Amino acid sequence: MRRVVTLVSKEQAEVGHRFRVVEVPDECRTCRLYPVCMGRLTPGRAYKIVEVRPYMGQRCKITDGEMVPVVVEEAPMIGLVPLNKALEGVVVTFEGECAGCEGCPQQVQVGEKIKIVRVLGRAKCRGGDFAIVEFYALGPPSPSKSGGATASRDPSRAPPSRPLSK
């Protein structure tokens, strides 16, 4: 998946270490290192360190600890999707069908595209059958149909029909 260079504490800087960004503290947003540190990560997503780069003397504004450059890749998330969408390798739109149950994806927005990596099992949510899957979120939701330049589906605006030729 997507790889990005970011900064982590010296204690976390180990290949294979996984971490989740819960939220970005306000103090980070005013730090000069923000664009290469927390600014490159998405809250709610999990990451795995795949490469540790040499320490270059950066220090965290909040903890005053040493910050080490690392290459991370987004780690797959685990959540529930409807059984009819649970096919390995398929990209689907998360519609929020599962909401409020344990295991429902909370780090994904309705309308966001997700790629199913692996089907792990089955679960029930609000009486419906769902699959437990590993998935990657591929990006923010598509623009809404009401705003932006999208094609109109109004039948009165459809081109006139023509008979099919043989």
Image (cartoon, rainbow, N blue to C red):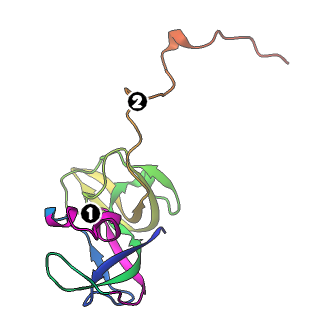
SS at badge 1 = loop
Residue 35 sits in quarter = bottom left
Residue 16 drawn above or below residue 156: below
Mark 1 Cα within 10 Å, few/some/many (few <14, many 20+)? some
Q: Is 129 one of the magenta-colored residues?
A: no
The residue range painted magenta reads 27-56
Which element type, helix, strand or loop, lies under badge 2?
Answer: loop
Q: Residues under labels 1 and 2: Cα distance?
A: 26 Å
Q: Depth check: give the residue in front, 93 or 145.
A: 145
Q: Determine the residue positioned at 15% across, 62% down.
A: 26
Residue 85 sits above or below residue 111 on the image: below
The residue to which callout 1 is attached is: 44
Q: Residue at x 49, y 54 (%)?
A: 91
Q: Which disc, if any, is residue 145?
A: 2
Q: Position of residue 15 (x, y in %)?
A: 39, 89
The quadrant holding residue 55 is bottom left
Q: Is residue 64 above or below residue 23?
A: below
Front-most of 114 and 74? 74
How far from the left and from the top, in percent, is residue 79? 31, 62
Q: Is residue 51 magenta?
A: yes
Q: Amino acid at mark 2?
A: Lys
Quarter containing the C terminus: top right
Pointers 1 and 2 in contact (C-beta within 8 Å): no
Please identify the residue farthest to the right as the structure is shown: 166
Q: What is the quadrant of residue 132 in the picture?
A: bottom left
Residue 154 at x, y = what percent? 48, 15
Given residues 77 and 100, the one toward you in this image is 77
